[in-house]
Amino acid sequence: MVAFAQDLIRVPSLNPPGEAYLEACEVLGNRLKARGFHVQFIRGEGAPGDSDRYPRWNVIARREGRGSGACVHFNSHIDVVEVGHGWTVDPFAGVVKNGLLYGRGACDMKGGLAASVIAAEALIEAWPDFPGAIEISGTADEESGGYGGVAHLAKMGLFSRPRVDHVIIPEPLNKDRICLGHRGVWWAEIETHGHIAHGSMPFLGDNAVRHMGAVLQAFETELYPALATRRTAMPVVPEGARSSTLNINSIHAGPPEGVKGLPAPVVPDRARMVIDRRFLIEEDLKDVKGEVRALLDRLAATRPDFRYDLRDIFEVIPTQTAEDAAVVQAVALGIERVMGKRAELVVSPGTYDQKHIARIGHLHDCIAYGPGILDLAHQPDEFVGIADMVESAEVMALALSQLLCCRQEA
Ligand SMILES: [Zn+2]
């Protein structure tokens, strides 16, 4: 398992730009082909970022069992985020030290992918006549929205019944936790308008930054306090994310940044702010948007010359798999048998590829479960514990044996 995870880490499948996806797919595909899987390579053609220089390759492998049963699918993303600074080991060497495997993607999520492959192989070896089918996929672009990856495959029907019944995504959520889903997302851009003039006579213009300041002030006095009072029944971790949250992602106005020399003396005639609103399953996206629009409309009604535009950028509906879903029960049982403790059921503060499986594939028997500590993802000296990989592979193999034999009706 460690050797295979090292093979995966040694392919620098950086996203952006989407480097070496085919090579990463081949490492996985060749491994599974040798174990009797039918392997398909699928390019996310036309997806954002897909080009002949950076094709969005995916691999999906399927092994049929004997006789009827359920299909269990393990989905891992093969992309990793940029390396960043502060590493003390080579991020693409797959260094093993003191029981830990280091590398970019070791935790998020090549360690989990390797664990799922070993779990499937162990099950096939122990139970050659297993019923149903096992699928394992390696997909592109999770770190940039998953459009060339899981979303593309889901549109082809590859994440829907009757082909697939249960999906486990081995993201690093800790080996004793089952992640049921995630909060919602709304990204939007607010633009305030003004009137350009010479900076020495600002009274002749209308400064868009001051209008944006009024928006910020309304956020501070009205929106943030309102969001803080809203609590979800979703078991989101960390605890702070059980409220609605809003991050101001960026603000831009005035002359472009990075230009050498003195700035031009002008009154900015427009200011733009990108907001990143994470909402709860109890909230409606329409109300989430309406709340911001109402605040802006109030400013337009009360503040002289206030004009604005509000533009949607991106949205994701919250999703949460039922606690009594078969995949949740099977993994919980595995955790109990391997670790002797009850699984903790959690929800992720951010989104991951489960969104596409729920919305496009209409498949709601899906969770994230895998080794690795979430906080280490995207950090320098990212690592995964080898003992944790072994334990979660055992859990995955037990869950597989539980799920394969009994097909549930949708
Ligand atoms: Zn991930």
Image: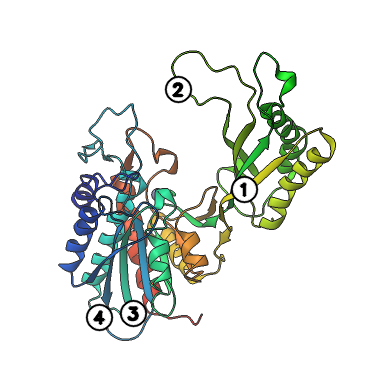
Left or right? Give the position of 203 relative to 28. Answer: right
Q: Nearer the viewer, residue 128 or 212?
A: 212
* Label 1 crowd (10 A; few <14 / some 14-19 / many >=20): few
Q: Does the Cβ of the disc 3 residue fall within 8 Å of ligand 1?
A: no
3 or 2: tag closer to the N-terminus: 3
- What residue would you read off at disc 3? 132
Residue contact between numbered discs 4 and 1, judged by CB atoms under 8 Å: no
* Residue in the picture at 32% in, 58% down: 393
Q: Secondary structure at mark 4?
A: loop
**What separation in Å lies between label 3 and label 2 (alpha carbons)?**
59 Å
- Which residue is at 64% across, 57% downward? 281
Residue 347 falls left or right of residue 268: left
Amino acid type at circle 3 is Gly
Q: Are marks 2 and 1 in contact (CB under 8 Å)?
A: no
Element on which disc 3 rests: loop
Q: Which mark is residue 129?
A: 4
Q: CA distance from mark 4 to mark 1?
A: 55 Å
Q: CA distance from mark 2 to mark 1?
A: 26 Å
Which of the two labelled residues, at mark 4 and mark 1, occupies the earlier sequence position? 4
Determine which residue is flagged by label 2: 258
Q: Which mark is residue 311?
A: 1
Name above or below for residue 64 compared with residue 185: below
From the viewer's perspective, is the residue at label 1 or at label 3 nearer?
1
- Which of the two discs, 4 and 1, sits closer to the camera? 1
- 3D distance between C-alphas at marks 4 and 2: 64 Å
Q: Nearer the viewer, residue 251 or 279?
A: 251
Q: Is residue 342 visible?
A: no
Kindly identify the amino acid type of the residue bearing the numbered disc 4: Asp
